[in-house]
Amino acid sequence: MANTHWNSRLTENAMRVLEKRYLRKDIDGKLTESPEEMFRRVASNVASAERLYGKSERCKKWEKEFYTMMASLDFLPNSPTLMNAGAELQQLSACFVLPIDDSMQSIFETIKHTALIHKSGGGTGFSFSRIRPKNDVVKTTKGISSGPISFMTVFDAATETVKQGGTRRGANMAILRVDHPDILDFITAKRDNRRLNNFNISVAVTEEFMAAVKEDRDYELINPHGGDVVDRISARKVFEMVVELAWKNGEPGIIFLDRINEHNPTPHVRAIESTNPCGEQPLLPYESCNLGSINLAHMVKRTNGGTNIDFDKLGASVKKVIRFLDDVIDVNRYPLEKIREMTLNNRKVGLGVMGFADMLVQMEVPYDSDEALEIAEEVMGFIQRESKAASAELSKERGPFPYYKGSIYDTGDDSKMRNATTTTIAPTGTLSIIAGCSSGIEPLFAVAFIRNVMDNDELVEVNPLFQEIAEREGFYSEELMKHIAEEGSVQGIEEIPEKWRRIFVTAHDITPEWHVRVQAAFQKYTDNAVSKTVNFPKSATKKEVEEVYLRAYELGCKGVTIYRDGSREEQVLNIGKVNRGEAEAAEAMAGGDMELEGLTPRARPSVITGSTRKMTTGCGNLYITINEDEQGPFEVFTQMGKAGGCSASQAEAISRLISLSLRAGIDCKEVIKQLRGVRCPNPGWEKGGMILSCSDAIAKALERYLLERKTPVGQKVKAMSAGYLERVPGFCPDCGGALDHESGCLVCRSCGFSKCG
């Protein structure tokens, strides 16, 4: 594995994410690839598509261009391309949409296809709108339909069981038309945060419905099986229910389905019914899309007159990226033949951006300003025009996409298109960590935040642009940076000049109105849709949420996702003191109150058998001995590899309490559930993943012990071993860190976990 100074352009966090999720490893989990080698692998694999067009001699040229573009962090493709290009899997697409028709055969065929896609690293979107409502009579069997919501739970359970090689987990979008008879059940389907956690849900809103809301009148509910009108209900009441549930926990979102189909580039093929999991990529059934993002933080130049957009560099980058993404379509290995056919027929690509907030900072423009909106339209308008020109140029070289005839581009002139779409604004949670820039078109997440490091120290991480300015302007100090991290914002901190307080606004400093206006500015010049979260403070009212939904519709957005801070019971904040929310974490993990009064621990035999496991914690090796009697696990002993110290005494205390619980007859899986995921400031790594604390190590040791024993208790543990934290929305299922709601997705800034890519 190459080890060069090249890696110095990557931040420590970027290296951590790459090592955890992207770089190749051997069978023992040892890294066999450097970041440089990863980018060379991807560039070489993607450029090999040139051979398909009789340009073998140009493979090396484009390999060099693609490598330089990625290695400089000017551009990154979606995660499956970075992970899988040139590897055995070779599945390079991030998003797919599958059809669900009103039959058991179609439903379970789609579940099978979903599992194959999730296994390959992709996310899936579905419309459940064709399934007949619950209690509808099924004529072939004389039975009663259970309705779309019941089948969503089946999809959710299937997703829970499929793991994606430890790098990506299954993500789904469920969409139901607002005129489906089961729409009220759908809107409230995620009222309980423990349900359908492998799904985002969005209501597909029609123009007729929005008109009925505005006029405060009823609208029709239509049975998709036969098309009969089965009821009329108040549009205003339904809309208010959507608002209330979104206010409560962020879902459902809304997509404006008729508006999406107005911009469907191939209406002669089929109507669009669904999107990918984050809502930014509308797709036809069996269609996939390949996404990538240009780093706008690198698309500025300093001149004597100040800092300006480097349109020459941006234009050259767009041209190369469109070629890159078109090549990806050809070298991709698709999970289904139907997906390969549809993708090759439309050849949709989705070029987006990241680092927009960083660009504004460099240009000294506040995010929530008219000037920022002008820059957004100018930049995205330029990317839209250049991407269309690049696609038309590729069409001359390679031919138009096969479904071109009858498409919106088929106007009879000589200019044809290689790709049915060219632009999408996708979430870039993990990619932006690698690139070291702000995520997508979101505002800054934080100017400074606290990260726990070794020996319980708190490390303050500061936005590099802010630190550079603070040092240059003479107001930098470590004390001030820590104060900013604790506050989570620079607003109201008098030591910082007003000019920079105005420029360094974060997501929670900005009003929802400005979030929507920025989204709309980018949507104006984007083929597909824009992934963006409209952030609300905890104090926001339902009326304010309603106004944002209406505003998004008025401004031409294709959908909207909101999140009110603290609205999920298990949310843990990661601004301010790092350990804030640990009480809520423990409460969330608790399986309920247990009545211990009157329990008598069983006596210890004179001879007992067991085994010892070595677990790697952040405080050293922890040796865990688990003994058993005829009834099962009986007691636990622990010994730290290095004697003494607080960690050793705490581990001993925990093991004594565990032993007491086991001897008193407490179910071992309840003990595991209480301890698993408890986090300390000093996690450790081992082959099986991250060990969050001594408590977590003991839980994992117990879990492995039971799995090996294959007892009835062990089988119960196996059923829950997919990860308890994965069912707690506020926590990262990989490292136990806090999850941030961004661009319609959940992202962990500690380890790079993302539900979306």
Image (tube, helix red, strand yellow):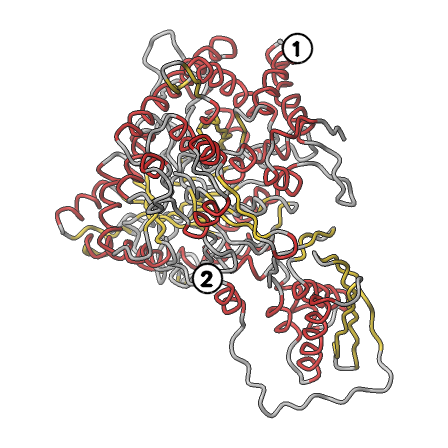
Q: Amino acid at mark 2?
A: Glu
Residue 89 sits in which quadrant? top right
**Residue 408 pos. (x, y %):** 33, 21
Secondary-structure class at tag 1: helix
Q: Which labelled disc corresponds to residue 570?
A: 2
Q: Which residue is at the front of the view, 436 or 179? A: 436
Residue 166, image x, y percentages? 64, 47
Q: Amino acid at mark 1?
A: Ser
Are the residues at dot 2 and dot 1 in contact (C-beta closer than 8 Å)?
no
Is residue 185 rendered to the left or right of residue 460?
A: left
- Image coordinates of residue 1 in percent, x first then y, are 76, 31
* Residue pictured at 45% horizontal, 43% vertical: 277
Q: Quadrant of residue 266?
A: top left
Q: Position of residue 318 (x, y in %)?
A: 46, 18
| Left or right of residue 729, residue 373 in this image | left
Crowding around mark 1 (Cα neighbors within 10 Å: few <14, some 14 to 19, many 20+) is some
Label 2 vs 1, first from the N-terminus: 1
Rendered view: 647 above or below 481: below
